[in-house]
Each structure stands twice: as structure tokens, then as C-alpha cells.
Image (tube, rainbow, N blue to C red):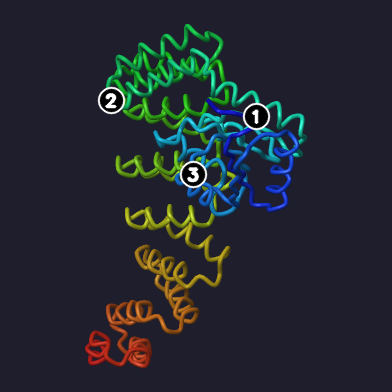
Amino acid sequence: MINLQNMSVLIVDDSVPMCQSLHAMLKVMGYGKQFFFANNGKDALGVVRKEPLDLLLMDYNMPIMTGAEALRIIREDRNLRELPVIMISAQAYGDYVAEIGESEIDAFILKPLTVKVLESKISEVIDKANNPPPMVLHLRKAREYEEKGDYDGAIHETRLAMEANPKSTRPIRELGFYHFKNNDFKEAERCLLRAAKLNSLDVFAFHYLGELYLKENNIEKASLYFEKAMKVSPRQLHRGINFGKILVTRKMSQKAIQVFDKVTNLPGCTSEIKEQIADFCFLKSLHDYAAKLYEALTEEEPKRWDICFKLGKALIHLGHQAKALTFISRAAQLDKTNVDVRLYLAKFYLSVKKPILAEKPLVEILDIQRDHEEARELLKQC
């Protein structure tokens, strides 16, 4: 049992004054005896794994690792997942709430905080942790059965959870998930569609409907529900990326590109994510789309020699030699000690029977690295 006055609390916020303010509020309430602090989700996980905690107060939007990302990892760890977590955020948008909801948040508080609201939420969360309602207990048992591979047991416990709280959509979607895992796709579809109808923000239901239709090779429906999941929770871009990759492996490149386009145009799609998609497309010989993404990235980050080099190589594959050489040469200028770029440039010139042009990058390589045997051998062809 967790004691409000003696509990151990971790406070996580990238703002030190906010951490101090939360600590002061807890002191005023008389809640908590031992306190720990972290300024991002990654550091918070380090504390959670090391210290026995009773409560986690965590900001949603933080650098390095967000609160939502840290929460997801906590809920996936059987040794940590029952830890009560209260998420704090200045954002009230539906996509934030949906993303947090996917990881079974215990409570959500909007900034600015007041002592009254914080006290009410904490007491409510701790009371539920000490006295879990029947629905929660049945769902926990269902998860234990599922982890043992006993889907029939999980389904039975989830049905009991539905009986315990008929108004909650969570048992319905969980039931759909267990039927999906048990390869009963018809029953899984029925439950997941019902959950999605009752809760338009149920990203979990949308996601597994997408997975279900993908298994049935119904690409149109799979695309529809993955897209719905991305729209509700656009920060979970991995859904669209994974779906796009699956389509590529199934030789449905045009459909994959449509999915990747939607992902790259969603809020929260960083340059890093775009580069990952471009790299994947390049490896899968979708050079046209890879070049499109690389070129956009060179405008966003013009000093990245490696992006210029990747774009040049993609353009070579497309037969756009003049344009390719412009970007490969730019890469060589941005990194004046890079041997790989110069070697690629020299080999290209030799392949198109222009040994005079190959001589310069080879000489530059030997200036950088005198014992470079391959460059020395290639120079003999000039």
C-alpha cells in the first residue's frame, strides 16, 4: 500500500524551476517523504530502474526523450508498468492526449498547476493504485495470460473486465487485440471496430485494425486505418513508416510512396525521420523518391556533406549525371578531408572514360592519406 505522506516521488521536467515548484507544492500538501528529480525522459528511466518509487510526476514535452516516450517504455516493462504516472503538459490538443492514452496514463494535468488540482489528482491516482477497480484487476490478469501465450485465458479475463465496467471502451479494444493475437480475425475485427466507433481517439483500435487488414492483404482498408491512427496521434510516425516499408517489400512501391508522403507531411516529422525514409528507399532502389527527400534535406541542412553525397549517388542511379556531380563536388568541398567522397568521384570519372577529371580527386586523396593504395593504383589509369 502506498502512503501519501511517506511515498517516494520522482519529478521530471526540463525546467528546473518547474521541478522546484512541484516539489514545493508537494511539501505544502504534506505528500511524499523522498524525492528524486530528472530533466528528461531518458534520465527519468535511469531513476525509475534504480530507485523504488511510488509515484512519477512527468512533463510531456521534453528534449532528448519526451514524457510520452518514457511512459511507453515503463508500461512495456513488467517490473515497472504498475508505477502510477501523472503526466503534466501545457498542451491540450487531442493528438497529445491520444498519444499519452496509448500508454495507459493514470492522470493528465494541464499547466498552469494549482495545489488544489495536483492534490486531488495525486490522491485519486494513489487511491486507485491501492484499491484497483475490478476492471483493472481483470485486465492485469489478462495481460499475464497473454504473456504466457494463453490467449483463451486472456480473452476470458477481458470479458470479465467488460462486465465489471460496461461503459469503458478499453476492455473492448483489448478483447479485439487478444482475438487478433489468437488469429481469430473476424472476432478481432468486430471488437476493434466497435471500440473505434465508441472512441474516435482510440489509436490502439485503429492501429490493430490496420494490422488486421494487412494480414488479410486488404491494403486499402489497412491504409485507411493506419492513416486514421496517424491523424489522431501524428507523433507515432513509426506506424506509417513501418506500413510503407511493408508495402515496398510487397512490390507496391507507388502505394508506399503515398504513405511516406503522408508521414513526411505530418507534424513532428523531423529531418532525421525523413533521412531514415530516404535511406530505406535508396537501399530498395526507389532512387527517384530517395533523391526527392535528400534534395529537400539539403535545403534544410545545407552544410551536411553526407546528405549531398547521398543525393549525388541517388542522382547517378537516375542518370542525372551533371546534377549528381554538382552535389558530390559540394560534399567534397564541405568535408575537405573526406576520402570516400573523392574516391567515389574518381571512380565515376573513370567509369565514363574521363581519366583527366579523375586525377584531381585521386591526388587530393593521396594528399590526405599518402598510403592509400587504391587511389595510387587508380591514378595509374589517368
Q: Residues within 10 Å of mark 3 (few under 14, many from 20)?
A: few
- The single residue placed furthest to the top in the displayed view is 163
User: Who's the residue at 46% across and 45% down the image?
Assistant: 260
Q: Position of residue 311 (x, y in %)?
A: 44, 66
The answer to which quarter of the image holds residue 199 is top right
Q: Earlier in the sequence, mark 1 or mark 2?
A: 1
User: Is 348 above or below relative to 18?
Assistant: below
Where does the image place residue 275, in percent across and percent down from the top left?
46, 57
Q: Is residue 291 left or right of residue 357?
A: right
Quadrant of res 299: bottom right
Task: Name the secondary structure under disc 1.
Answer: helix
Q: Circle 2 is placed at which residue position?
A: 148
Which label number is shown at residue 210?
A: none
Q: Secondary structure at mark 3?
A: loop
The secondary structure type at the circle numbered 2 is loop
Reply above or below: 299 against 248.
below
Judging by the rendered image, the residue that carries numbered circle 1 is 122
> Left or right: 59 with respect to 255?
right
Q: Mark 2 belongs to which amino acid? A: Lys
Q: Where is mark 3, residue-wise?
A: 51
